[in-house]
């Protein structure tokens, strides 16, 4: 499972909430939507600053991503010792991870432990789905609720609204022709049932080979009768070399956990300080040295491969060397040359998020596994008993949709969010998700988005990104309260400049050189706009400067008399 995902409470919404003007004080300082890691930490930090906060969550449990994504093989792709909270030393000393890369059950247990340890459940309403929130100009607060149509539901009045719904929380469900005609079981990796799914002896098709697909495929291949993998785009997968957590490493990290966290925060992605990127070019060494260095990091496993040289993300020629290294690994691992060729990606490595796998390519050597390349044999239609691709019918008993997410904006655009003058977020973002600092949107005062467009979560250890943004929001809200400020809103000039900055940074990299969810390219009709920001330390510095300089780029308004 890609770790940019902090799935929140909201997935569907249709209607508005009351916007009746009121001059009475709102009952909440902030309403937080979503009880994943972001929502849990936001509640904790709000309470620590004396703010009255409430979390609402659509699911019946905390955990966000790690509650919903329980598909076979689901696990984190950043090492467990890094993919964890650092705000409380006792927590990080007491909690003991069992694997180098934690699996979904352990991550969900960790989220529940955090909720219990810090008594957060008393501030969380489960089974409570936000449907809409409107800005009440007279009262300078948000009117939010759960009602749909003529049903009233519950309502809240909050000075601030914090959306902790996560960048990867609304599944992408392509409208395949005839899918409703299929009589077998249809499962989506992001909506996996709690009950175990038994594929023993079945003919199973998996559509999609991103992170969720790769993990599912390698896990179920030994169980099923026949596995047919329908590949939309070939993926680069690097080995995890997962196993029990090294006891010596755990002791080393825990001996200086604060220092370890601080060193990670100085990394471009907020993790990886144990093996930092090399600060020299792929072209500064011989071909033999280069191959040896790639191999060394391949044997370590994980994302460190992209840190072999400092120009792999910014120089297409250097990037191609890394891409060809991985393609050679695929050719060596997969026995059938035609299958190996189809599994070799042609786009720049890292342009789409890397998959961290356990034996993915070797899985295609199994006699019960077959690859169908949808680039040459596209899906034509589903039937009652399977699907037709490239003119061939594939009989299936079950289908797994590993088709990803409507990333960054999908959840928010399914809500009825209305700012000043009734401005709908759908209208505001018609051409793409405009924002300032990845936190705020012009026309939507006192609304904060965590891990959204314009911020670094997609390229960062998401828990590190969450901790930073939550602390910034909490500090800002306390500061504004102490100064008697009722509302904070980004200015149009700051918003325009920030979106231009995000795209300027992306333009210096290879990230614009393929169709990815970073651009919204996986969703038909979605505006093409590069959404995440690359470079965590520079982002942290910019946010700190904004606070220290009195919030340039924001308009602040006092309480109405």
Image: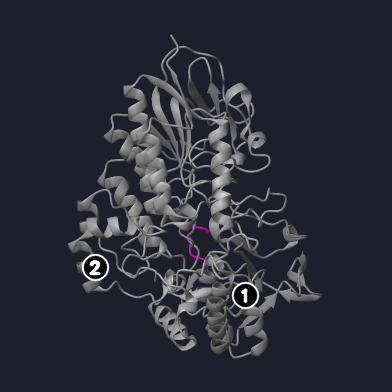
- Looking at the picture, does residue 303 appear above or below residue 296? above
Secondary structure mostly seen in the magenta stretch: loop
User: Whole-percent x and y of residue 409?
Assistant: 58, 45
Identify the image quadrant of residue 547.
Answer: top left
* Residue 50 marker: none
Helix or strand or loop: what does disc 2 sit on?
helix
Q: Is residue 122 visible?
A: no
User: Whole-percent x and y of residue 254?
Assistant: 21, 62
Q: Residues within 10 Å of mark 2 (few under 14, many from 20)?
A: some
Image point (53%, 70%), residue name: 216
What residue occupies the far top of the structure in this picture?
A: 561
User: Whole-percent x and y of residue 276?
Assistant: 35, 68
Identify the image quadrant of residue 231.
Answer: bottom right
Q: Which stretch did the figure color magenta?
A: 192-197
Q: Residues within 10 Å of mark 1 (few under 14, many from 20)?
A: some
In this rendering, would 362 be left or right of 516? left
Image point (27%, 35%), residue name: 48
Q: Nearer the viewer, mark 1 or mark 2?
A: 1
Image point (55%, 39%), residue name: 435
- Looking at the picture, does residue 24 appear above or below residue 536? above
Asked whether 452 falls inside the magenta stretch, the response is: no
Image point (72%, 50%), residue name: 525
- Looking at the picture, does residue 127 appear above or below residue 92? above
What residue occupies the far right of the structure in this picture?
A: 391
Count all numbered tags in the image, as a single digit. 2
Q: Nearer the viewer, residue 237 or 326?
A: 326
Asked whether 196 falls inside the magenta stretch, the response is: yes
Which quadrant is home to the C terminus? top left
Q: What residue is disc 1 on? A: 345
Q: What residue is disc 2 on? A: 250
In this rendering, would 554 be left or right of 520? left
């Amino acid at each position: 499972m890609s770790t940019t995902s902090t799935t929140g409470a909201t997935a569907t919404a249709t209607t508005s909430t009351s916007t009746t003007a009121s001059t009475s004080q709102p009952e909440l300082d902030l309403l937080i939507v979503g009880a994943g890691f972001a929502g849990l930490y936001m509640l904790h930090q709000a309470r620590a600053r004396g703010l009255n906060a409430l979390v609402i969550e659509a699911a019946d449990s905390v955990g966000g991503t790690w509650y919903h994504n329980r598909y076979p093989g689901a696990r984190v792709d950043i090492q467990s010792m890094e993919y964890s909270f650092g705000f409380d030393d006792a927590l990080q000393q007491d909690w003991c991870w069992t694997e180098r890369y934690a699996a979904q059950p352990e991550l969900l247990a960790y989220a529940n432990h955090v909720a219990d340890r810090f008594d957060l459940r008393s501030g969380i309403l489960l089974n409570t789905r936000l449907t809409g929130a409107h800005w009440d100009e007279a009262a300078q607060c948000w009117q939010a609720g759960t009602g749909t149509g003529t049903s009233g539901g519950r309502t809240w009045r909050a000075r601030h609204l914090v959306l902790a719904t996560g960048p990867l929380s609304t599944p992408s469900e392509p409208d395949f022709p005839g899918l409703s005609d299929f009589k077998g079981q249809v499962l989506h990796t992001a909506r996996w049932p709690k009950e175990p799914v038994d594929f023993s002896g079945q003919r199973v098709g998996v559509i999609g080979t991103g992170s969720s697909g790769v993990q599912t495929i390698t896990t179920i291949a030994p169980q099923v009768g026949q596995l047919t993998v329908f590949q939309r785009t070939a993926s680069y997968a690097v080995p995890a070399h997962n196993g029990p957590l090294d006891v010596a490493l755990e002791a080393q990290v825990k001996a200086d956990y604060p220092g370890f966290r601080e060193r990670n925060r100085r990394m471009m992605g907020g993790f990886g300080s144990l093996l930092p990127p090399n600060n020299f070019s792929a072209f500064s060494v011989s071909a033999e040295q280069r191959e040896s260095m790639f191999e060394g990091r391949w044997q370590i496993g994980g994302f460190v491969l992209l840190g072999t040289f400092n120009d792999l993300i910014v120089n297409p020629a250097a990037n191609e060397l890394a891409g060809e290294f991985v393609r050679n690994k695929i050719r060596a691992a997969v026995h059938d040359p035609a299958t190996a060729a189809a599994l070799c990606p042609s786009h720049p490595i890292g342009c789409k998020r890397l998959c961290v796998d356990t034996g993915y390519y070797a899985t295609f050597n199994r006699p019960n596994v077959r690859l169908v390349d949808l680039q040459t044999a596209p899906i034509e239609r589903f039937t009652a008993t399977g699907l037709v691709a490239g003119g061939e019918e594939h009989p299936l008993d079950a289908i797994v949709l590993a088709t990803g997410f409507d990333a960054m904006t999908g959840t928010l655009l399914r809500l009825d969010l209305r700012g000043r003058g009734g401005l709908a977020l759908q209208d505001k973002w018609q051409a793409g998700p405009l924002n300032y600092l990845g936190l705020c949107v012009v026309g939507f005062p006192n609304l904060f988005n965590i891990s959204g467009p314009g911020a670094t979560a997609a390229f960062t250890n998401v828990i590190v990104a969450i901790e930073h943004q939550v602390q910034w929001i909490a500090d800002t809200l306390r500061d504004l309260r102490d100064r008697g400020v009722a509302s904070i809103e980004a200015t149009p000039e700051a918003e325009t400049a920030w979106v231009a900055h995000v795209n300027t940074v992306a333009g210096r990299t290879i990230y614009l050189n393929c169709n990815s969810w970073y651009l919204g390219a996986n969703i038909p009709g979605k505006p093409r706009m590069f959404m995440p920001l690359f470079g965590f330390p520079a982002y942290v510095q910019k946010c700190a400067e904004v606070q220290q300089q009195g919030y340039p780029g924001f308009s602040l308004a006092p309480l109405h008399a």
